[in-house]
Image (cartoon, rainbow, N blue to C red):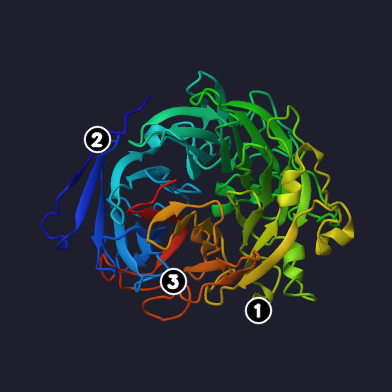
Amino acid sequence: MISAGTAGAVPSGAGERPGTVRSSVTGSDGVTYTAFNHTVPYARSGRPHQWLLVWAGGTASGESPDPDFLAVVDASADSPSYGKVVNTVTLGPNTGNEPHHMQYTWHQGQSLYAGGILSDTTFVFDTTHLPELRLSGVNTPLDTPCGTAPDAYWVLNDNTAYGTYMGGPNVSGPCTYSDGSVRTGNGFAGTPGEVVRIDSSGRTLSETAAALATPEDPVTCPSVPSLPVPSCANPHGIGVREDLNRMVTSDYVEIRNVVAPTEGSRNPYLSRDTVRIWDIANRNRPRLLSVSHLPKGPRPPDPDAFSDEQRMVMETALTHERKHRGAFASTMQGGTVFYTPDITAAKPVWREVFDDTTAYRSFQPDGPLSGAFDGGSWLQLSPDDRYLYHAVMGTNGFLPREEQTGMVYVLDVQKLVSAGRNARCSVDELAEIENGGSEPDCPALVNAVPIRDTTSANVGVGPHWGALDNFVTDARGRIRETTHPDRLAVANYFVAPTGIDGDHRICMLRQAPDGTLSIDQAFRDEYTGQACLQFNRTAWPHGATGYARPHGVLFAASGSARH
């Protein structure tokens, strides 16, 4: 075990804005990390409140890079300051972390886990004093020698979290994990990745290899440079069912070949097609049970195999109710959704159940857009297991900019999930690509909402990441969790170093009683007056810095929020 050091909140220091609250942590690397809260007045202060937390990266401003920060946005729909940024929590001393993801859902009392994908750092925040956030722990590269490039987190009931680290060890060569096993990796942001368990002080509780000890398919699991034991282990998405003692992770890509392509990186199989299921009965010793290669779908094969349906598995979404055991997975280059009905099965069977092309056809009947290269991203299932939500960036670089658009769509999956092991849906015929699956239990498209970036100079990008609002405010102003969310938020930004940026907007969507989605026109930017919150601004609670890049989003609440 590696200690992350000590933490504490301290008063403002000389030169800071009046009212600034600072917290600090000394990491295992000896560096003192700080978080500065810059809270400004907002409507109905002191009352129960809903918040949208946005994990954002600074961009260059003059000779000094701007700070990375967490923005706290007023998300109480009945508040006069709805949509206002009421606090920015700036981090120091390091900048350029490339803020990425947090946990998928926040519950009352949980810490907040937020990753810097390029700095290989996980920041942990105490959420007790929302809208203020106080740094409680930092997990540095020294704390995870066998993994790099942290992506997503799942917080357990004991407030510890599993994090997916997509990349290989800090340095190439053999690395010894917490259980004594050894894997050989090819270095930072390479292969194989791992799963890390972290506590709320930032301490590493365990590092677990995502790679099998034996070779995985040497043809479909290459690496650059190659490894003596081939593996597709680059975990990105994560889902946990503590009641079933199961965890599911999806393998994405050997990430450094996306950020800094080389001649050897022009290999479609570096974009992984695998999903891993784990036994987590021993929380510090996850045991890998299965590695499944998702199947090829009915589209004509891509001659180069880059956009085949199973290519680049970004996300997974697990069912919630005890009577259900299924899980979904989605692909980024392939633009499709897959499903397995039982994650406890010894040999899970995954089938394609939806092609993003069907969603595009709902608003572009004769358009050129399809699931191929569409940038399928955030995937989340409603707590009642009825609706599946999916954000699609719309990043097909082979099409003209004016023909591209991202979208958010929602599927009704209750028939499929309720079928259990008797699920029959399988998208395996050409007609089903555009029309949806023909079996009666196949997901039904409720609707799709186009969200288009018209500003960025490089490849356009619509929504990449999102979050469901798992809270509701009753008539007496009390906030509680709900299994029937009626809002979600999405962020239009990917990862600028890859050449795919975005217009840096946060959009709120409402879900009507019939399940359809629409942009929330009341969630307006406080400066532009337009729907959606714009992070291309220079006025922030922490000062006049430059534009910011918002990636992870998460709903939270303070006051009387309860389960």
Of residue 533 and residue 332, the one placed in the foreground of this image is 533
Mark 2 neighbour class, 10 Å CA radius: few under 14, some 14 to 19, many 20 or more: some
Q: Is residue 407 above or below residue 382?
A: below
Q: How many marks?
A: 3
Of residue 114 and residue 184, the one placed in the foreground of this image is 114
Q: Is residue 371 visible?
A: no
* Amino acid type, mark 3: Leu
Q: CA distance from mark 1 to mark 2?
A: 52 Å
For mark 3, what is the residue? Answer: 533
| Residue 384 horizontal/vertical position (percent) | 61, 49
Indicate which disc, 3 or 2, sits on the residue closer to the N terminus.
2
Of residue 480 and residue 505, the one placed in the foreground of this image is 480
Left or right of 552, for residue 462: right
Q: Is residue 275 visible?
A: yes
Instruction: Please tell me the numbered disc located at residue 402.
Output: 1
For mark 2, what is the residue? Answer: 6
Q: CA distance from mark 3 to mark 2?
A: 36 Å
Q: Secondary structure at mark 3?
A: strand
